[in-house]
Amino acid sequence: MTAILGIVLPVFSLIFAGWLARRIGVMGPQATSELNRFVVYLALPALLFDIVAKSSWHELWQPHFLAVFTLSTMAIFTLTVAAHARHSGFEADGPVLGLAASYPNTGFLGFPLLLAALGPWSNTLTLISTIVVACVLFAGAIVLIEIRLHVGSHPLRVAAKVGKSLATNPLIVAPMVACFFPTTGMAVPQPVEVFLKLLGGAASPAALVGLGLFLGEKRQAAKGAGTLTAMLVTLKLAVHPLLAWVLAVTLFPLDPPARHAAVLLAMLPTGTGPFMLAEFYGREAGVTARVILISTVLSIVTVSAYLTMIG
């Protein structure tokens, strides 16, 4: 419990710092948007580039773990998007809500939590999950949002707009360009590595402060937001890890340590990525912010219970 609190409490401190800064007027109404743009266009691309550039294709090739984590994550995302489309139609809000239900905070919470709970060997599995979340789940959500924003246009025109948006999106371009290094075996030059570390290191704290700034805004909750938030939190903290466990036991058997890693990673609370995307596109940022906050609080209980159960 102490190790978990030591990881989660700094997260709340950063969120609270942003909330307090907005409440007392230190940061103005445009601060959330500008800080989010800094994360999306500078800090997070640097972090993703650094992660992929230092990866090794050989150590990352763990097909059963990859299948368990990817399929469980994408299943929750797809289920949420489909349910929203059935209820509200073909809107860009769906992919954002899908992210809120399926996007685990692997980058900020995953590495320190699994390191403390399972040991250094788990870093590779956490890295795999982080790449899946950033380069498959996040990129897929961006594609769906762009398609839905341009629905009704000629298919070729839609494809051109989506292609342009993806080709100029730093969250997709950065990890793709970084693939050059693990593919060729070359190392990132030292000055570039220092630059990436400095800039990428700002991604998580800036995103968390930005979340606090958003929560510090006085606004009226939308009708039915409480029910929607509860459903998304349940999917994230309960259904997602349960599905990962089922897959790890049945279709893609994993040894106990790897199985526990997959379940713990799926059990992590919603990360700040969905909020950054929601705020950037102006889609369901309020619901997403509440899901992140509530799931992070409740994860102290759920993760502690699972760690106690596995001894």
Image (tube, rainbow, N blue to C red):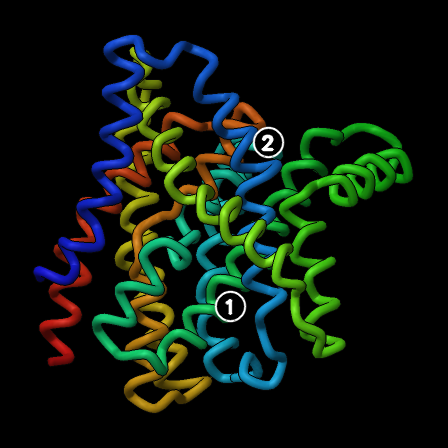
Task: Return the residue at label 1.
Answer: 70
Disc nearer the start of the sequence (2/1): 1
- Left or right: residue 139 versus residue 62 is right
Q: Is residue 142 above or below residue 268?
A: above
Left of 168 or right of it: where is 175?
left
Q: Is residue 137 visible?
A: no
Residue 111 lies in quadrant: bottom left
Determine crowd level at label 1: few under 14, some 14-19, many 20+ residues with C-alpha closer than 10 A. Answer: some
**SS of the residue under disc 1:** helix
Residue tagged 2: 91
- Is the N terminus in the top left, top right, bottom left or bottom right quadrant? bottom left
Q: Which mark is residue 80?
A: none
Taking the image as shown, residue 150 lies to the left or right of residue 43, namely: right
Query: Dividing the picture into quarters, in which one does residue 131 lie?
Result: bottom right
Residue 277 lies, with reference to residue 106, above or below; the image says: above
Q: Would residue 176 be visible to someone looking at this image?
A: yes
Separation of residues labelled 2 and 1 (CA atoms): 24 Å
Would you place residue 35 above or below residue 273 in this image?
A: above
Q: Position of residue 270 (x, y in %)?
A: 36, 48
At label 2, counting other C-alpha atoms closer than 10 Å, the crowd grade (few under 14, some 14-19, many 20 or more) is: some
The image quadrant where one finds the C terminus is bottom left
Task: Say what secondary structure mark 2 lies in.
Answer: loop
Q: Amino acid at mark 1?
A: Thr
Q: Is residue 162 left or right of residue 236?
A: right
Q: Picture coordinates of residue 186 (x, y %)?
A: 71, 74
Q: Examine the rendered structure and indicate whether residue 9 appears above or below residue 281.
A: below
In x, y percent, where is residue 271? 38, 47
* Residue occupying the point 31% across, 28% down: 212
Residue under the image location 69 percent in, 61 percent down? 178
Q: Residue furthest front?
A: 191
Q: Amino acid at mark 2?
A: Glu
Please report the residue visible at 43 percent of the width from the left and 52 percent of the height from the top: 103
